[in-house]
Image (spheres, grey):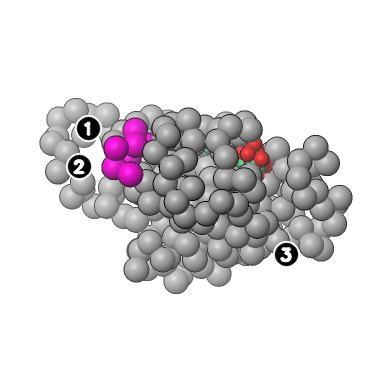
């Protein structure tokens, strides 16, 4: 299969043929494409050096709490490589819970190319942001701001100057952004997670009591932000 983390409809569907043979409107009316979907990266676990085992517990706990409240909408945890440790941990832990695997699954791909390269339309994507809500800095933040073009920075600035740890900010993406045109993204939700990296601002110095609380709040804010887009 092209993507061993994807549910069967992606494995069996020849997405490239669908795209080349059908008009844009028929793609949009295809039921698989019209399911509201939030793609999100694992917040804080790379540059911010948060413990992967603890983070995976929190992701599964928060997904379980929110997925049933989101109607037919889907939550998809994304990472760049098939060797992703966080995807493996979350997959294993989610399988032990009664979480509907059509409403929550993991997916390997670049979050800025999920439709064009992975055939998966996600109308909302989450960003592991920095507190200044600035482009660059590496990781998924640099990738999303770069793929979205300057329209995202402008739209973000109109809504907030900064973000506190544990908070999320929903930003509607202008339809002129390449991420909207090529990938079908309508909103970016910036999320600021807890930081355990001494080289970055607001380091929690391995205080995982505080860190786990803030990471849980970050996912709650993210999923509540996604719910607010759906309503
Ligand atoms: N697509 C999908 N997943 C990605 C991508 C991508 N293009 N790029 C990275 N990941 P990180 P953090 C995964 O470091 O730990 C930034 O500099 C990555 O493998 O982006 O919250 C900001 O400005 C990992 O699983 O975020 C902040 O200062 C996950 O995304 C700081 O890093 C998060 O990794 C935030 O650090």
Residue highlighted by disc 1: 19
Q: Residue at x 20, y 42 (%)?
A: 27
Q: Residue at x 73, y 64 (%)?
A: 213
- Give x and y (percent) for residue 103: 43, 58
> Can you tell which of label 3 and label 1 is closer to the viewer?
3
Q: Earlier in the sequence, mark 2 or mark 1?
A: 1
Quick check: can you spot residue 144? yes
Q: Residue at x 22, y 32 (%)?
A: 19
Q: Earlier in the sequence, mark 2 or mark 3?
A: 2
Residue highlighted by disc 2: 27
Q: Which mark is residue 213?
A: 3
Q: CA distance from mark 3 to mark 1?
A: 43 Å
Q: Residue at x 76, y 58 (%)?
A: 211
How packed mark 3 is, by other alpha carbons closer than 10 Å (few <14, some 14-19, many 20 or more), is few
User: Which picture quadrant has residue 166?
Assistant: bottom right
The magenta segment: 174-180
């Amino acid at each position: 299969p092209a993507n061993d983390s994807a549910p069967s409809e992606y494995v069996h569907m020849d997405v490239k043929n669908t795209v080349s043979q059908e008009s844009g409107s028929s793609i949009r009316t295809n039921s698989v494409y019209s399911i509201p979907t939030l793609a999100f990266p694992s917040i804080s676990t790379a540059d911010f050096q948060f413990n992967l085992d603890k983070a995976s517990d929190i992701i599964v706990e928060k997904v379980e709490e929110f997925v049933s409240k989101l109607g037919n909408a889907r939550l998809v945890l994304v990472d760049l490589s098939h060797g992703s440790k966080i995807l493996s941990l979350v997959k294993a832990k989610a399988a032990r819970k009664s979480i509907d695997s059509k409403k929550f699954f993991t997916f390997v791909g670049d979050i800025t190319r999920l439709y064009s390269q992975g055939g998966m339309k996600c109308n909302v994507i989450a960003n592991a942001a920095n507190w200044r809500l600035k482009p660059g800095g590496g990781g998924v933040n640099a990738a999303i701001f770069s793929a979205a073009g300057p329209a995202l920075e402008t739209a973000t600035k109109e809504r907030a100057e900064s973000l506190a740890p544990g908070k999320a900010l929903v930003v509607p993406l202008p339809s002129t952004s390449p991420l909207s045109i090529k990938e079908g993204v309508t909103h970016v939700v910036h999320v600021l997670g807890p930081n355990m990296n001494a080289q970055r601002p607001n380091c929690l110095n391995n205080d995982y009591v505080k860190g786990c609380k803030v990471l849980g709040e970050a996912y709650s804010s993210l999923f509540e932000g996604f719910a607010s887009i759906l309503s």
